[in-house]
Image (tube, helix red, strand yellow):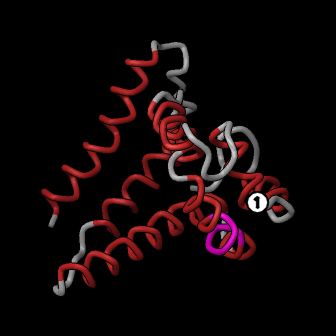
Amino acid sequence: MPDTQTSPPVRKSKKRQGVTLAQYVQHRNGVPLGAAGSLQNMFYRSLGAGSFAEFWQYWNPIWGYALGRYVYAPLRRILPAALALILTFAISGAVHDAAATLVRRSVAFLFTPWFFLMGVVVIVGQALRIDYSHRSWGGRVAINLTYILSCLLMTLLAF
């Protein structure tokens, strides 16, 4: 997902325009694109993130790069950062739903509301300056998984 934790998203999205996918993945995973340990680093860094916004900075950097560049940045030019971020999450969910629909050969509508809700949680966490980086790595994992699974549960209960 797009960078939003440490500075205004508009600056980061403009900065990213000059960054290649390989550079972005190297920055996020600490190893080159496709290198051994890349997946392990992604899981370690994302699950151990000290905020839910930071979790998304490390989760799936290839997809995050594409979303930041081709969805978030254009939306950010016309919308406030929070709304652009939430819509980026929803669009990501819609793409996941489209893929699930193709695989299942029946309409899937789980990811769009689930991802929308996680986008809202990111924005709320930023607004409240929720930071659990002082906790142990295991504690941070538990918190991040709780956010993800709570959003999933709320989505399942609502639909």
> 106 or 112, which is in the foreground?
106
Q: Position of residue 61 (x, y in %)?
A: 59, 53
> Considering the image in quadrants, where does the N terminus appear?
bottom right
Q: Residue furthest front?
A: 36
Name the residue beneath numbered marker 1: 13
Dominant SS of magenta comes to: helix
| Disc 1, SS | helix
Rendered position, 120 above or below 53: below
Evaluate whether residue 127 shows in this view. no
Query: Identity of the amino acid at label 1?
Result: Ser
Q: Residue at x 50, y 22 (%)?
A: 132
Q: Residues within 10 Å of mark 1 (few under 14, many from 20)?
A: many
Rendered position, 10 above or below 29: below
Rendered position, 129 above or below 82: above
Q: Residue at x 47, y 73 (%)?
A: 91
Inspect the magenta stretch and tell me whether residue 72 lies in it: yes
Q: Residue at x 51, y 69 (%)?
A: 87
The number of numbered discs placed on residues in the rendered structure image is: 1
Task: Report which quarter residue 62 is drawn in.
Answer: bottom right
Instruction: Please provide the residue range marked out in magenta.
Output: 68-73
Task: Report which quarter residue 57 is drawn in.
Answer: top right
Inspect the magenta stretch and tell me whether residue 91 lies in it: no
Evaluate whether residue 45 shows in this view. yes
